[in-house]
Amino acid sequence: MGAIEAPDLSLAALTPLLFVFGAAAVGVLVEAFAPRDSRHPVQVVIALVGMVGAFVSTLLLAGTREVTAAGALAVDGAALFLQATIAGLGALSVLLFAERSLDPARSAFVASAAVPAGSARDAELATSEHVQTEIYPLASFAVAGMMLFTAANDLLVMFIALEVLSLPLYLMAGMARRRRLLSQEAAVKYFLLGAFASAFFLYGLALVYGATGSVRLSEIREAVSVSGTGGLLVLGLGLLIVGLMFKASVAPFHTWTPDVYQGAPTAVTAFMGAATKVAAFGAILRLLYVAFGTADWTWRPLVYGLAIVSMLVGAVLGLTQTDVKRMLAYSSIAHAGFLLTGVIGLGPGGTGSGLSATMFYLLAYGLTTLGAFAVVTLVREGDGEATHLSQWAGLAQRSPLTAALMTFFLLALAGIPLTSGFTGKFAVFRAAIEDGAWPLVVVAVLASAIAAFFYLRLVVLMYFSDAAPDGPTVGVAGLPTTTVLAVTAAATLVLGVVPGAVLDIAESAAVLVG
Amino acid sequence: MTGSETLPADGLLAASWLLIALPLAGAAVLLLGGRRTDRWGHLLGTATVVAAFVIGLLCTVQLTGVEGRSVQVELFTFIQTGNLDVSAGLLFDPLSALFVLLITGVGALIHVYSIGYMAHDNARRRFFAYLNLFVAAMLLLVLGDNYVALYVGWEGVGLASYLLIAFWYQRPAAATAAKKAFIMNRIGDVGLALAIFIMFAQLGTTSYAGVHGSVGLLAGGTVTAIGLLLLLGACGKSGQFPLQAWLPDAMEGPTPVSALIHAATMVTAGVYLIARSAPVFDATPTARNVVLVIGAVTLLIGAIVGCAQDDIKKVLAYSTVSQIGYMFLAVGLGPAGYVAGLAHLLTHGFFKAGLFLGAGSVMHGMGDETDMRRYGALATRMKVTFVTFGLGYLALIGFPFLSGWWTKDAIIEAALDHGGTWGWVLGGVAVLGAGLTAFYMTRLMLMTFFGQARWGDGVHPHESPPVMTAPMIVLAVGSVAAGFLLVQVFPLSGWLEPVFGEPAEAAHVVAPIVVSVVVTVVVALGVLTAWLFVGRREVPVTAPVRVSPVVRAARRALYADTVNESLFMRPGMWLTRALVFVDNRGVDGVVNGAAAALGGSSSRLGRAQTGFVRSYALGMLGGAVLVAGALVAVTAG
């Protein structure tokens, strides 16, 4: 046995990860040792420092293209762009978590999530202002896992990152203060199905290792080009794809999405909807183009089909939803399909403009989704949120600004020009057309038209229906939520009107090494 | 076009864009300034046009000293896309100078007249704003150095015409007339637009120089198509057969508008277009012959219908239709006729504007009555109007040595000189038209100024204020002298030589003196007939019902509206109804059906969302099997 050599680590390239992991670790310690009164502000500051630090350091690292940690991590343009996106979305989500003025009990999260719903202790906790602040370290771990996910150059690291990002999310989904049963159900469902999907991924990993003798993406690539694609290898690839598509909520692996989006605390849903999608697509791009880029003919028809199924399922099922959060969940399924058209648009060998288009789309979609869910946290009834569509009727009369913001985000999700949604869709569709996938784009445009119906229905409901006399109230947002709304609305507008600069950045960052 | 190089402009000519900019600025100030400009708006509007006239005059004087008498003013690039490059530039040459002077000169007089005519109208400022807009657009039309600029001006005058016809939009008749004018003009405009498209597609340019220089390279059929489409545009704008029906209805607008737009300037834009496109028509005898036929047919239609109308402005309107028919006939004759046609256009601008202003003055005095059967014996009540109107009348019917005599005889001569059967037919039509003109205009004079007074109680005819009569006097002087000046003193043929080339000395088929005598005799017969029919007897206050079929047809404008309604309007409405039906049942059916199908499948698919983790997991497993199966199938296949 030879001596175990320490892997060669480029600490500079890992700064973003270190920031967030550090913040998460410190957060756990604070949770254990800091006095209860000062815990909340301290936790918020630590989480924000971690994520903003990560965001800034990714910007400083721009242009870095290296493989480090003994080949396990690839810090390249795509990784840095997506890490910056995740860190930014994470920071905004932390602001949403930190909102203290909407819920009468000063927090949207419950102190003890494991107490059986409906019990006396549960009722007592519902109004208690004593809250645990573990949501912040959990979010930090999730963000760290997501950032690691997009940089993973090794299937094992990818799996570990998957678990690091998933486990905190399972917990966070169950922490809603109101509608406890729904929240707990969401957490359990997410956990069970997530574990199921992880098992697929792990089995796929094992099969690929069996076929190629390596878990390193670059080595898999070489093995594929040397010895071709055997049954074992493609079976492994299929299972890996299943695991990743589950995280990206691509149909037919989407079934958890509506239930979890609806049950989880809305701020957590916002975080999941925005950041998880970025991370999942980062990993999908890396797996498909770095490891299997030379054998793209094997998976291209599959991804083509998944894109179509996802767009249609999301758009069609969204039509009959009556809950705003579920509606946005189906919207996210449809958007996963649109994103896959961008993945197709990378073209053989990853030379097309699809990578930059997909990254831009992820950024635009993440910000818009975060904004839309932030608006949902404002519309309240009694102590909780009013999420049934009928409760939103006539909202424009009660609160014109809230209705206008929601309308703007919905138009962006529908892909109306002058919003970031249009620019993103235009970019991915163009990439797909350049690659000759015009039938896919035709389906995508049709699906967009179908989906536009349910977005616009909510707009019509807000503006052209009479308000119910006992309708919901619109909460006065505190500084954190206001900041989130301002940033996301401004970004949605800027990326729609003058997207040039950001598109250029995405263009120059569209590099996958490994 | 002669081959001489067009020079870049210098001196005042370089500032000829001011011609367009001044009235446009006037319109902008009046429209945007709102009520604040009410008190002085009409003065500003008049001042801009007077200033434009002065600039136009100075430019023209400067132009006489320029070699080749043609300058180009480059302004800016208007459209640049692909290989289409339309730069906005102006072309100041003898032809456009002619029109600039006519538009700004007559325009200025009519602006002055309108100060009095519209004095009691609350919306006078709006009126002057539209008039200024019209002048600006019309100047752009004649000054542009390419067909796109012409088209912009063309649409601009169409818009101004629409706004001014409907100036009293509260009256349903005015609103309807404006719509009719706008829609019938659209038909012509489509022709013009298509002609420009063909030019661009075939030649890659729309500038006059570019198109006219390379028109010889085109296939004969293409040139004919361009020519006919340009003619369609000209027919729409100039109220020529078969698009003549809008022009008489346009008299619903205020009378100064009828004088300026629907007599002197805008309706002659078609003549300008054909004269400007002379190289195109030189290359296509077919299109040129169609121009001839249209001119001849229209001049007869206008004259015949004019004989049976009782509304003073309608008579003048049909007279305009008929006289523009003469001009079309002239420019359709080719090089022999261009100068004659344009000369008639100028003299017609004077006397027809004067006649309209006179009619306006009569209406002003008669409480806006337009029915000539309720006039009579106004000669003594409105002396200035009578004299100026009378001079315009004499000029129009071609009284020897007045304006119309010089220019109309020239057209008749040119028609006869065309040669062969064609020449005889066209000449005969033109002579017949002259006789009819004499008839309907004498009838108008007799019914209005002579005979018994037939106006109702409470009407007190009076002379109009000097601000109205002064322009009428100036135009009357023009009606008397313009023809002599343009033919004998400053020969138009010499002035236009750089545009149309040296006038060829035609071999006369009939000696000019004989033509003059014959025409004069025919005109005298027309006058005599009118006196026999109208002057001798009492004019019934209500139009007689029992009349000959010819009169009935003429009263109904030779059934032009009936033809339009049955050929275009009704089928159009049927088509609309059919489309609405298809839209309701077919398109909406498909859309609603699709929506219902999607909603149904949404509910059905939604049942898979049971809420049970076990069925979700089963779904995922099924998906995984499909994914693996697909991959294996692709790889194995």
Image (cartoon, coloured by chain):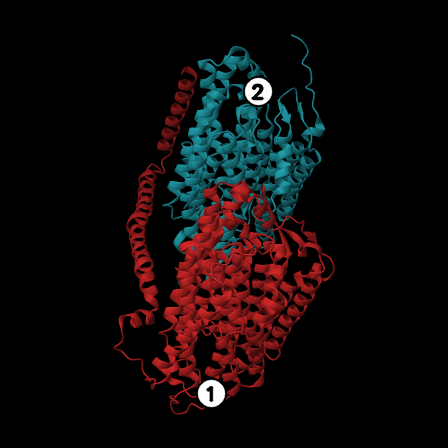
The 10 Å Cα crowd at callout 1, few under 14, some 14 to 19, many 20 or more, is some
Q: Chain of mark 1?
A: B
Picture coordinates of residue B265, whole percent (x, y)? 53, 66
Residue B515 drawn above or below residue B588: below
Query: Which shade of the palette goes to chain A?
Result: cyan
What amino acid type is highlighted by mark number 2? Answer: Leu
Q: Are marks 1 and 2 on the same chain?
A: no
Q: Nearer the viewer, residue A50 or A412?
A: A412
- On the rendered image, what quadrant is the C terminus of chain A found in? top right
The 10 Å Cα crowd at callout 2, few under 14, some 14 to 19, many 20 or more, is many
Q: Nearer the viewer, mark 1 or mark 2?
A: 1
How many numbered marks does the figure carry?
A: 2
Residue B379 circle label = 1
Query: Which shade of the palette goes to chain B?
Result: red
Q: Which residue is pictured at 46% across the width and 18% down the height? A: A234
Left or right: B194 as drawn, with respect to B242: right
Which residue, as the protein is rendered here, is positioned at the far left? B546
Q: Secondary structure at mark 1?
A: loop
Picture coordinates of residue B343, whole percent (x, y)? 55, 65
Q: Chain of mark 2?
A: A
Label 2 sits on residue: A217
Q: Nearer the viewer, residue B340 or B3?
A: B340
